[in-house]
Amino acid sequence: MPKKVLILNGSPKGENSSTLKATKAFVEGIIEGDSSYEAEYVWINDLNIKPCLGCLSCWGRTPGECVIKNDDASVMLKKIKECDIFIESYPLYFFGMPGTMKLFTDRMMPFMSTYEGQQAPLDGQSFHGIRFDMTDKKFVIISSCAYTEATNVFDSLLTQYDAICGKGNYTAILCPQLKTLIELKTGSREERFLNKFKQAGASFAKNGILTD
């Protein structure tokens, strides 16, 4: 049975996303590194995702299930549970994820165990705990920005993921000035640049982590 890489393209620019170019190269590397993987791409802008109601039913009346049934969120949550590697690909907008991605992230709350007043956890643990067994699943964030460095710029985004997933339980590939770098490199230069992402993907497929 093939293993699944699920890629959620969260860029408002869709197919024209510079971040997606890097992500596609990374995914090509995964498949080259382990041919048992197959990839499925989903465009966030093609989905009908309604805002979280804040009713917290997924923590109480219907544990692990959202009460909203007439949109695409439940389909996406099922895909995430069934995949082996889940990749979110998007640019950094105003020091956070694009609005459509935040909308969907809020709808991932059914994955979290009920909050019962627990204190902030130690590194490596999510604040709530994950309701479903995600032991063998890999989560990758590929995000780019126009700034010249990743230091400080991505801090608020990573703090959110640390609380949700637990520090060290996801892989972040942060790409400062990615759009500029891709636009400056044409032909063989662009190919060599994107090949670095492909090499990273192949390494990730074999080792489950990024290596130098």
Image (cartoon, rainbow, N blue to C red):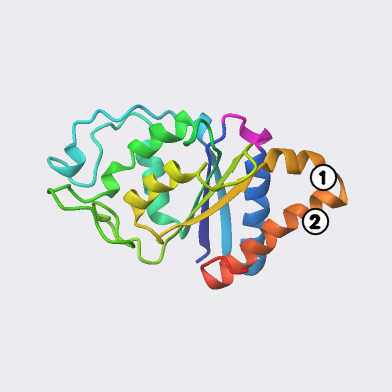
Q: Residue at x 64, y 68 (%)?
A: 33
Above or below, comparing residue 42 to residue 120 in the picture:
above
Q: Is residue 15 within the magenta segment?
A: yes
Q: Which residue is mark 1?
A: 185
Residue 102 in picture, x, y percent from top left: 41, 34
Q: Is residue 180 within the magenta segment?
A: no
Q: Mark 1 and mark 2 in contact (Cβ < 8 Å)?
A: yes
Residue 25 in picture, x, y percent from top left: 68, 53
Amino acid beneath label 1: Lys
Residue 206 in picture, x, y percent from top left: 57, 72
Distance between the alpha carbons at the discs numbered 2 and 1: 9 Å
Instruction: Identify which residue, 125 or 57, lies in the foreground.
Output: 125
Q: Which residue is mark 2?
A: 192
Residue 147 in picture, x, y percent from top left: 62, 38
Left or right: 35 in relation to 79: right
The answer to whether any part of residue 4 appears in the image is yes
> Range of the magenta residues?
12-17
Label 2 element class? helix
Residue at the right extreme of this rendering: 187
Q: Residue at x 53, y 32 (%)?
A: 93
Where, by quadrant of the figure, is residue 76 drawn? top left
Above or below, comparing residue 78 to residue 133 in the picture:
above
Label 1 element class? loop
Q: Which label's residue is closer to the chain start, 2 or 1?
A: 1
The answer to whether any part of residue 72 appears in the image is no
Amino acid beneath label 2: Arg
